[in-house]
Amino acid sequence: MPQHTPPRPICGNCDGFPTVAITTGTRHHDGSRVTVPATCRTCNGSGHTTAAAALARAGR
């Protein structure tokens, strides 16, 4: 019988949305908005916490 891997915990800082686009308020010449990508620093853009970080938080 195959072994299933347990799901990795979702990052608590970004709630699984590691990369977002933030508008700056200005527009391009064609009328579209200027956006800046932002990546979660805690999970480095993966959306999940690492196993080491999950084990470190589990202790007293």
Image (spheres, rainbow, N blue to C red):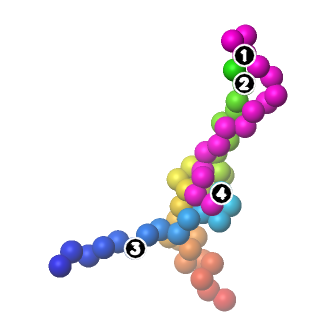
As for residue 22 lying within the magenta part, the answer is yes
Residue 4 image-quadrant placement: bottom left
Badge 4 element: loop
N-terminal label among 3 and 2 = 3
Where does residue 43 sit, x and y in percent of width and height? 59, 56
| Residue under pointer 1 | 31
> Where is 24 relative to 13, above or below?
above
Q: Is residue 29 above or below residue 33?
A: above
The amino acid at mark 4 is Cys
Q: Which structural element holds mark 1?
A: loop
What residue is shown with label 4? 14
Most extreme residue toward the left, as rendered? 1
Q: Which residue is mark 3?
A: 6
Q: Name the quarter where the N terminus is drawn.
A: bottom left
Label 2 sits on a secondary structure element that is strand
Q: Residues within 10 Å of mark 1 (few under 14, many from 20)?
A: few
Which residue is farthest right? 25
Residue sitting at 58 percent across and 70 percent down? Answer: 53
Q: Residue at x 53, y 69 (%)?
A: 9
Tell me the tag on residue 5.
none
First reached walking from the N terminus: tag 4 or tag 3: 3
Relative to 32, does residue 15 appear above or below in the rendering?
below
* Viewer-side label of 2, 4: 2
- Pick the residue in front: 54 or 38: 38
Residue type (three-letter) at the residue carrying disc 3: Pro
Q: Horizontal and vertical percent for residue 11?
A: 60, 63
* Nearest to viewer (mark 1 / mark 3): 1
Name the amino acid type tagged 2.
Arg
- Comes first in the chain, label 1 or label 3: 3
Q: Residues within 10 Å of mark 4 (few under 14, many from 20)?
A: some
Gap between marks 1 and 3 measured at Cα = 46 Å
